[in-house]
Image (cartoon, grey):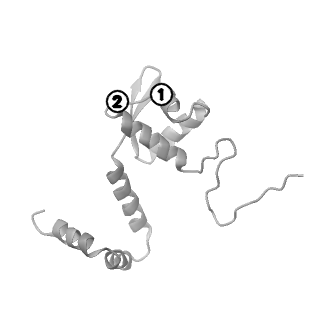
Amino acid sequence: MTREVTNSVGVHEPTAATGRGRGELEAQVLTALQQAAPEALTPGEVLERVDARLAYTTVVTALTRMHDKGLLSRAKRGRAFAYTAATDNSGMTARTMRRVLDGGSDREAVLTRFVDELSDADEDFLRRLLEPGK
């Protein structure tokens, strides 16, 4: 008898077919697109670079969702779309930080805690970025 374990706390479990956690496919797709830049890749080309064992429809779904999130741009190439990353890794991290900040209930408290936890060097750098004229 096989026992199914349900994770009730929302931790992302690996998928059965690939051992890949949710979000990991998006990270791999993004890496493949960034490595191919400035060339745009079709879903089939992404599939070859990520994991040829995946279903084509899985890759198309991931690309479509990432495009809908604003992570990718796309243009028609033949009968398919060809995708490019909308930004680099630093831009992706900044978008994530902004999304988390926007989701908080007390923006000032979040920013205060963030700055409090910065190293002295990072705090000095942030001050220079915020100086007028920068």
Residue type at mark 2 is Glu
Which element carries disc 1, helix, strand or loop? helix
- How many other residues sit within 10 Å of disc 2, few (<14), some (14-19) or many (≥20)? few
Residue found 60% across the figure and 47% down from its top: 20
For the residues labelled 1 and 2, say whether their Cβ atoms are less than 8 Å apart.
no
Residue that protrudes farthest toward the left in the picture? 133
x and y percentages locating residue 65 in the rendered image: 50, 43
Report whether 25 appears left or right of 81: right
Decide: is 116 above or below 64.
below
Report whether 118 appears left or right of 59: left
Dot 1 or dot 2: first in sequence order is: 2
Report whether 22 appears left or right of 46: right
Residue type at mark 1 is Glu
Residue 94 sits in quarter:
bottom left
Residue 125 sits in quarter:
bottom left
Which element carries disc 2, helix, strand or loop? loop
Residue found 47% across the figure and 25% down from its top: 80
Q: Which mark is residue 66?
A: none
Residue found 58% across the figure and 50% down from its top: 22
Disc 1 to disc 2, C-alpha distance: 11 Å
Residue found 59% across the figure and 33% down from its top: 57
x and y percentages locating residue 59 in the rendered image: 55, 35
x and y percentages locating residue 74 in the rendered image: 39, 34
Q: Which mark is residue 39?
A: 2
Q: Circle 1 sits on which residue?
A: 45
- Figure quadrant of the C terminus: bottom left
